Image (cartoon, rainbow, N blue to C red):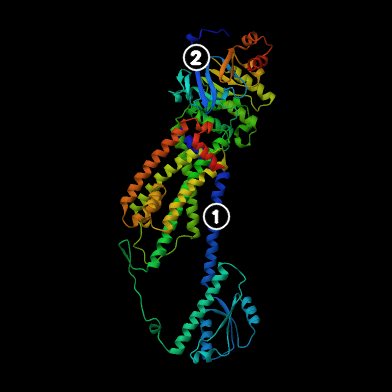
Amino acid sequence: MCDPPTSMVAQAVQVENLRKRYGDVQALDGLSFEVRPDEIFGLVGPNGAGKTTTLRTLATLLNKDDGAVTVAGHDVSDDPDAVRRAIRYLPEDAGAYESMSGRQFLAFVADFYADGNEAAAMVERGVEIADLGDRIDDDTGGYSRGMTRKLLIGSALMTDPNLAILDEPTSGLDVQNSKTVREVVKAFPDEERSILLSSHDMLEVEYLCDRVGLLNDGVVVSSGSPAELKAEYDAENLEDVFLEVVA
Amino acid sequence: MRPFTRLVWKEARELLRPRYILPILLLPLLFVGMGQGFSGVEAQLGQEPTVGVVDRDGGEYAQVVVGTLENESNLAYRSPDGTVDAALNETAAAGGSAVVEIPANFTERVRAGERGRIHLYTSVESVSIVGIASSAQVEELLSTAAHNVTVAVTGASEAQLDPIAREHTTYVKGRQLSAPPGVVSTAFTSQFIFVPVIIMLAIVFSGQMVMNSMASEKEHKTLETLLTMPIERRSIVAAKLVGGSVVGLIATALYTSGIAVSNLSIGEVGGTTALTLGAGDYLLVGVSLFFTLVGTLAVALSLGIFADSQQGAQMLLLPLSGLAIVPMFATMFTDVDVLGLPARAVLFAIPFTHPIIAPKRLLFDDADLVLAGIGYEILFALAAVWFAVKLFGSDRPITGNAGWLDRLVRLVQQ
């Protein structure tokens, strides 16, 4: 993908000098990056680097201490409701309401974004992405972790968000389902839709992401396309780049 | 379905799952079972006792005793010279447990102006309310026999034996009642145990439901998804309050029905019909309870933010339940007016006190304090809801970190 000048496009995400502290721990220490329209941006880093804090801040779950963060043109602090309308967030360890069937859960989510036929179409899209067959009408309490994950992927992408924030999207999935989900994620971005994902699976990141931000100690230490990063660090794959950066 | 309605529906569905609702359904059934058990005891105690008598005297006054037993009880065994063991066995076979033995010199001693001696043998097989209460029934029988012997010896009339007829007028806070103080006290106890218990149950159940709602979101990892939905945080707070209180009030209604059916607290009390509440009074009690519930549920929701599981929620509910129990007992065993200023200040500061004392206040036309209490509860509810909305807008639902408050909550949970 050709990189247009940053200033000429409205970014899906713009993060500048983001800081966040938990007590004595400086989780984010001047983090900056952007996610462009029509791209999948991967945020990778070791445990405790600040990935989840970053994703949660973008999803309006956490308040920032300092810095500027906009999502789909809306400031996360000044207009959190507009940000929520523009995004869908899939946490790493998420569940569904046990009293609902998979289809009812999708309908529950769809009701927040559309009415009537539009909501029904959204649910059907979610059913298709989740690909759970007849089990979609079973209570989610009986789902395996992988089935729940597929349902949540379906619920996250069915609403056509401007930005889908996916934390470890294939966590808990077997090889076959991981591949299916990766294909769905890969096909998702367009001019109005982007994906920001976090993953510890460097092969997955290399396969899915147009650009990657390497996060360490609360700052992005390097970013670029997988090819650029491999060239910069003279590495064969993204895993080696990661190890080089963390070291 | 609109998002808010969908949220309320979701809350109700989650809280009506068997794990939450079964314990609530089982306890009222237990109350009903207990009530039927007590009804059985009452029915048993309402019947004439079955006794046996060994009359070794056979004289005039012994005949009076035996005659009383014949009239007032089911006399299963009668013998002039049987052994006590045989008498007890035969009486027990007929369903009784007591044998009265009248010694040979009974009539002679009474004639001589001495106290006649009677020996009562009781076999208590059941160490229970029934077993002990049935012994008391036989004691009453012997008191009646003693009364009849007195009449037979002296020839006195009933009026001579009990020459003073009493009429009672009792003034309760200026209200005149034609009943002895003991009866008035019983009436108050019966009426005002029931009302505080119901109010306490409503507070505890609704609080528990709202806390369960938050704990369930955390336990099933749905909170982050919910909080990123395009709906304002105050709507999420409101949906949780409405959903939790609906289920909580259903639970309260079930308990109230269970208690009413079991007849554990409501008794018929004579002479106090002047002490009843009007429709307007009940409305004020309802308004008072409503605002207390709103405030309490908001506090429960805030506490629920710190609960990481169902068990954690149960522990956090304890202080709230304790606060609800204090005014309940204070109202049951004393009058707030007679307490010292510090104790009264503490009680009035507890929001639950106001709906609990409201019925008693309204009974004596003291609506001003009830209205002041409602004003206080409105302020409490507004503050509690504001605090809950602020908490939902902060990092705390996600991080659970609340500084010193967090440390205090952890201490309670441990």
Please count the marks in the image: 2
Res A16 seen here: yes
Disc 1 marks which amino acid?
A: Leu
In the image: residue A32, left or right of residue A235: left
x and y, in percent, of residue B267 in the image: 44, 63
Q: Tag 1's secondary structure? A: helix
Q: Quadrant of the C terminus of chain A?
A: top right
Seen in the picture, residue B176 relative to B112 is either above or below; the reply is above
User: In which image quadrant can residue B100 be found?
Assistant: bottom right
- Report the disc number at residue A184: none
Q: Residue visible at 46% across and 51% down?
A: B325
Crowding near the residue tagged with mark 2, few <14, some 14–19, many ≥20 C-alpha atoms within 10 Å: some
- Report the disc number at residue A11: 2
x and y, in percent, of residue B160 in the image: 38, 84
Residue bearing the label numbered 1: B29
In the image: residue A219, left or right of residue B83: left
x and y, in percent, of residue A172 in the image: 65, 28
Q: Tag 2's secondary structure? A: loop
Question: Which chain does the numbered disc 1 sit on?
Answer: B
Disc 2 marks which amino acid?
A: Gln
Crowding near the residue tagged with mark 1, few <14, some 14–19, many ≥20 C-alpha atoms within 10 Å: some
In the image: residue A212, left or right of residue B174: right
Seen in the picture, residue A158 relative to B195 is either above or below; the reply is above
Q: Residue visible at 53% across and 88% down?
A: B62
